[in-house]
Amino acid sequence: MVKQTFLIGFMLFALFFGAGNLIYPPTLGLEAGTSFWPAMIGFILTGVGLPILAIVAIALISDQEAQLGNKVHPLFGLVFTSVIYLAIGPFFGIPRAANVAFEMGVLPFVSAGGDHTLLLLLYTIVFFCLVYWFSLNPSKLVDRIGQWLTPALLVAVAALCIGSFFMLQAPSSTPSEKYHSAPFFSGFIEGYLTMDAIAALAFGIIVISAFKENGIQSKSALVSSTLKAGLVSGAALTLVYGSLGWIGAKMAVKGDFENGGQILSSATQLVYGNFGLLLLGLIVALACFTTSIGLTVACAQYFSRVTRYSYKQIAAVVSGASFLIANLGLNQIIAISVPVLVAIYPIAIVLVLLTFLNKWFEGSKRVYRGAILLTAIVSVYQGLTEFGLQMTALQPIIEQLPLYGVGLGWLLPAVIGASIGGFIDHR
């Protein structure tokens, strides 16, 4: 069972490690400079810790992730979970992964400029045919990803990082303004923005199903095994994040970069020449591909359970819809997805945290409802403002909330809402 736990942990690592996770740490390293370690510790707490907590929360309540939302109301559980799956699946998450893989793994090898619409079309046809094929048999997901794709991804990342450790010896630069006074907290917020806690709500059912197929049935054993697999995944993510962040810190003196992708592209060229671009393309392609497979499987499993359609039918629809949306282009997808994710992410975090605190308030629905209601008011407001909508009546109140400026304005309302629910329960 130890071997199987490691394989499932490796599978979970590959599912989490998408393109965004690849390019955030180098940006942090470059901007944090000499404050790299406190910033990276903060990043790991939310970029690794929160997703693992979410996975364990799914195992803690049952194997039906909708029950997280059912604590508020069954209808809310169904609707909110469906929105999460659609957002991180065929509407945004999967198409974005395919586009990032195309832009970082293909475009560097073709002529600059010009219209690449046809090339993107051909690439996504192959990409989503392979995603669909890999997702057809979920029972083989651990073998296909845990035994083959994850080791290939880790070897490629290790080659980049080891080469960089020997070739990049420049001293770290002075921290940017964001990381100058409170690097730990800034890193903490950056890890929160990876959005992996939402993906964990989808991946949790895959992990639990994998353990059940290996004979583990009791809740205590499932929670224990899920935690161990989460720690394996978390250790790998921590090592990779730290290494990629270190590369970013050493690249600060090499010029100006717009994003983590440019940092990694320049680093791989410095270390390995043109072969570096091929190596980076392989890393990005594997990272995006494994994440897309996991999201397709998770969406198909969930929607086949709540509808009358079969798993294979749903997997085909998810792959087809993702293919169509992917061809809208990366910028269009990001423009639409960010406001939606800003709106739903805090709600997901509060649900996960309340699951761990459940016994302290005896699972009171009023506590859940109060916390989620006030959290949703703030998070939906933030999402709508991201869309460009102005709500002048709420603006003076919400924007004065503590931590609003760093994206945590929902935190105090969540506590207040939970407290009001608990007070009503004990009148």
Image: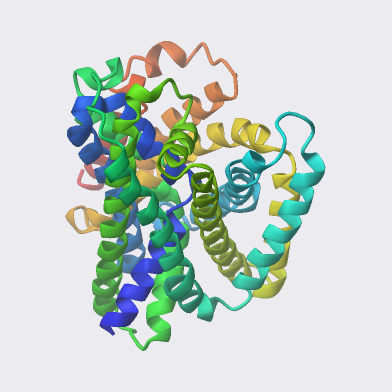
**Residue 198 vertical position relative to residue 183 in the rendered view, above or below:** below
Residue occupying the far right of the picture: 118
In the rendered image, which quarter is residue 419 located in? top left
Q: Residue at x 57, y 67 (%)?
A: 297
Side of 397 relative to 277 (left or right): left
In the rendered image, which quarter is residue 422 located in? top left
Q: Quadrant of the N terminus?
A: bottom left
Q: Residue at x 56, y 58 (%)?
A: 289
Q: Quadrant of the C terminus?
A: top left
**Residue 370 vertical position relative to residue 378 in the rendered view, above or below:** below
Give coordinates of residue 195: x percent, y percent: 43, 43
Side of 28 relative to 123 (left or right): left
Q: Nearer the viewer, residue 379 or 154?
A: 154
Give coordinates of residue 44: x percent, y percent: 27, 44
Q: Nearer the viewer, residue 214 or 68?
A: 214
Side of 314 relative to 258 (left or right): right
Taking the image as drawn, is residue 66 in sight?
no
Give coordinates of residue 148: x percent, y percent: 47, 73
- Name the colouring of the figure: rainbow
Q: Residue at x 78, y 49 (%)?
A: 121
Q: Residue at x 52, y 80 (%)?
A: 140
Q: Nearer the viewer, residue 370 or 254?
A: 254
Taking the image as drawn, is residue 347 in sight?
yes
Give coordinates of residue 126: x percent, y percent: 72, 60
In the rendered image, which quarter is residue 117 located in? top right
